[in-house]
Image (cartoon, coloured by chain):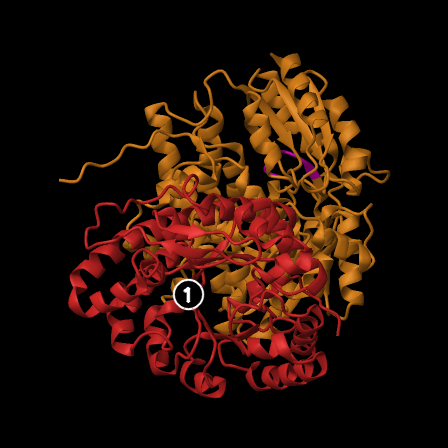
Amino acid sequence: MKKVKRIIPKKIGLDAWSKQFQDFPDETIKKYRYYNNNEWGVYLSPPATFMVYGLRELKRLKFDNSFESLRMWGFVFNETERLFRARQINKKIIATMGDLGIVPILVLSFPDCVPFYPECLWWTPFFKESTELLDTASKLGTPEATCFSRVVVSAFHKRSYFPKPDLIIASTGASCDDYSCVMQVVEDMGYEIMWVEIPYRKNPEFMLIKPKIQELEKTEQGFSYPKVIEEYLVKEYHRIWERLFKLTGVNNPHRLVETIKKVNRLRSLVAEIKTLNARAEVAPLPGLEMMTIEFGNLYGYADFDEWLDIIQMIHALVKNRVEKGVGVLKKDAIPIAWITPSADPYLLNLVEEIGCRIVETEYVINQAMVKIEEDIEPIRALARSFINGSLIGSPAERVKNIKERIAKKEIRGVLITNMLGASHCAMETRIMERLLSDVPVLSLDVPAPFGITQQIKTRLEAFVETIR
Amino acid sequence: MKDILTPRERFGMLVIDEKPDRCPVIPLITSHAATIAGIKLKRYYTRGEKMARAQIIAFEIYQHDAISIFSEVGIIAEAMGSEFAYPDNDLPILKNPILQNSSLDRLTIPDPKKNGRLPVYLEAIEYAYKAIGDIIPILAYVPAPFTTGMHLVSPEKFLVDTLKNPDWIIDMLNIVFEATVKFCYEIINAGALPIIVDPLASGSVISPTIYKEFALPYEQRLIHYLHRYDFDVILHICGDTTAIMDKFPDTGADLISVDRVNMLKAMEKLASKMRLIGNFDTTTILFSNPDDIYALTGKMVEQLKYAHKGYIAATGCEVPIRAPKENVQAFIKGAKEKGWYWA
C-alpha cells in the first residue's frame, strides 16, 4: 500500500510549490474543471504557471501548502480565461460594479449569466508588479490621484481582461466616489451603463427630522435605519431584475429563492472558516488565503458552483487543522484586526512575517458576509442584507465589531491600509483611528506596485514592537 | 494603427482562442539580438546577463511580441558532457560528443543550475523576466531529446543506430528526456515559457519513419509534461516538414512553428487543430531589401491571419545573426500593419 505523505501545514514559496506539484498524478490535475468543461476547463496549476504568464509577485509571495489552497489559487488566477470561455459557450457576462455583494445574486438567478467585478482587477498591477494598467488609465483620463480601481478604465479599453459585458450594472451614491468617476470615464468610452443608486444608511439619531419608531428598522448588527432606505433598494433591485429579464427573456423568481439558499450556504461556510481561524490557538490559514476566501463571497470568482465546492473543501481542511491544533503561524503571533483590504497582497505576507496574525477584518464587504433572510420576499431579503454594508454607514459602524473584540482583549492592534485617492479612506481613516485608540493603530497608504520599501517594513516592525 | 495591448496581453488572448488587437509578431530573434545590441556573440551565449540585455535591447528597437532566450541547440548535450568549441564571432560548435561508443555509462542528468551553460540561460531568463516580464512573454527554447541526442554522439552513428541499434538510442533518449524535463522545470521557475525545438527531427534530416519512432514520442512526453502546468506549448521544427505535417497534431502541441513548408497547405491541414506560427523565409530577411520584405510579409500575414485557431507572424527559422536591422524592421512593420483584427 502506498504510504500517504503527511504534509505539515506551513507557508511555502513558488519553488516549493512547483516541487510539490510534480507529485500530483495527472488524474488529480484533470479532475477539477470550471464550468464542468472537459476541453479547456482545467485550472489546477501551481503558482509557477501564472508567474510565467506574468504575475511576477508570485515569485516572492508565500502561500499555504495545502492542496485545497492550491486549488483555490489556480481557480482565482484563472478568472480572465474563465470569463472569455464563458462568452465562447454563449453565457452572458454581466459586470456588477460597486455594490459589492448583492447584484451578483440577482444575476446568478438568470440562466447562463455570469456576474463578475471588474474592480477586482485592482489587484492585478500588484500581482504583475507592473504599473502598465495604471499608466494606461492615467492616459485615458483617470489620473494618479485616483484609487487603484482606475485599472477598470484600462481593462475596458484593452478588452483583454474580460469580454465586452452584455450588461454593466454600476452602483453609485453611497459607494466610493473615485469609483463612480472611474465608471463615468468608462461610460464616456462608449459603454452603456445601468446606474443603480445606493442609499446612505442614515443613523436616525442624527437626522434633523427624526423618523417615527414605526418607520425604523434594524440591521442584523443592530444599526437603526429609516425603512424608506429599504424600500428604495427594493425598487432598485426590481429595476435590475426587469433589465435582466429583458436581456435573457426569463423571469423565474423561484430561481432567486434557490440562489439565495446557495449563497447562504457559501456565506455560512465562510463565516465558520473565519470563526475557526480567529479562535484557533494556531492560525489554520494565512491571511492572504483568508482575504481571498472572503472576497469569493462577492460573486464566486465567475463560477459560483465550483467556488462553493472549493470552499467546502477548505472548510474541511480548516476544521481538520483546528482539531489537530496545527497551523501556519506561530502560536504567539499577535492578533490584530485589518481594516480596508490591501491592494498589494504582499503586505499580508509581510505582516505575518513580522509576527502578527489577522483575527478580524473589515474589508468593506460586510454586506457579503451576512446571512440573507429566507422567509421573506427574496428581493426584500437582498435589500435588508445589503443594508448591513460597510461603505454605506458611518465609520463608527464599520469598527463596531473590532471595538467589541478589543474590549474582550482578543485584538491587540489595528492595521488600516488606505487606498491612495479613494475618498472614503481619506475621510474615514482618521475617524477610525480615534475610535480605536484603545490599542495601537497603524494606518498605511498602500504604495504603487513594487513600492513596499524598507520604510514601510520599519513602520510595521515598530507597530509590532509597540504591541508586543 | 497603434497597439492597444502589450505583447503579454496579446499572447494571453491568443492562447484562449480570442482575437487580440492584432496578430502577435514574433520573428525568431535569437542570437541576432547580440548583433543588434553590439554585444559579442561569445559573450551573448556565455553570460546570462548579456544574453538578456541583448534581448531587451532588441525588443526596445524592434517592438516585437516575445523575447527568445536561445543561442543554439547543443546546450543540454553540453551540460551532459559533450564538448563544444566557442568561436569568438560564431555560435558554439560540437567538438567532442560525450559518447564515443555504445555505452551510456558516461551519461548523467545535469543540474541546470550548475552544469554547462544551462545556468547562463536561467540567469538570462531571471534578468529579462525581472526587467520586462510584466509586458512581454519570455520564451526559452529547449531542444527536444532527439535533437539533443544527436549532439551526444556523432550524428552519423546516431542515425545509423536508429536502424542498427534502436534500443540503445531509446535508452539514450530516455535519459535525455529526464535531463530535458529537469531543465524545463528550472526554466519555468525562473519565469519563462519553454518552447520545444526539434530542428534535427526535420524532414530535411530524417525520414518520417525515424521521426515517428524516435522524435515524436519524446516531443509528446515533453509536451505532456508542460501541459500538466496548463501551458500552451509551442513546437518548432525547422526545414522542410511537409512529410511529417500530418503528425504534428499528434505531438499535442498547441502552437506549431514551421519553416520551409507551403503555409496554405499547413493551414488547410492544421489550422483547425493548432495555432500556426511562421514562416517568412530567413534568406530573404538576410539578402533582400526592406521594401520587398514589407510587401511579402504583408501578403503572408493577410493570407494566414484568419487561421482558425490563431496565427503568429514569424520567420520560419531564426533571424540570421547578421541580418540587416532595416530588413527585420520591415518584416515587423508589414506584419503589424496587415495583422490588425480590431475595428
| Residue A26 image offset from top left, x and y in percent | 29, 54
Which residue has dot 1 on it?
A40
In this rendering, is residue B325 above or below B53?
Answer: below
Horizontal side of residue B198 vs A129, given as left or right:
left
Residue A383: x %, y % from top left: 63, 51
Residue drawn at 42 percent across, 52 percent down: B84
Magenta stretch contains residue A222? yes
Q: Which of B269 and A48 is in front in this view?
A: B269
Toward the viewer: B75 or B93?
B93
Q: Which residue is drawn at 65% across and 19% down?
A: A461
Q: In which quarter of the image is the C terminus of chain A?
A: top right
Can you tell which chain is drawn orange? A
Chain identifier, colour red: B
The residue sitting at the right extreme is A208
Q: How crowded is mark 1: few (under 14 residues within 10 Å), some or many (20 or more)?
A: some
Give the amino acid type for the residue marked by disc 1 in the picture: Trp
Q: Main secondary structure of the magenta part?
A: loop
Query: x%, y% of residue A228?
Result: 73, 50
Quarter holding the N terminus of chain A is top left
Quadrant of the image occupied by residue A165? bottom right
Q: Where is residue B83 in the image (x, y as percent from the top left)?
A: 38, 50
> Who is closer to the viewer here, B68 or A154?
B68
Residue A309 visible in image: no
In-image side of A425 versus B202 (left or right): right
With respect to residue A346, does A413 lie above or below?
above
Can residue B77 be seen here?
yes
Q: What stretch is highlighted in magenta?
A: A218-224
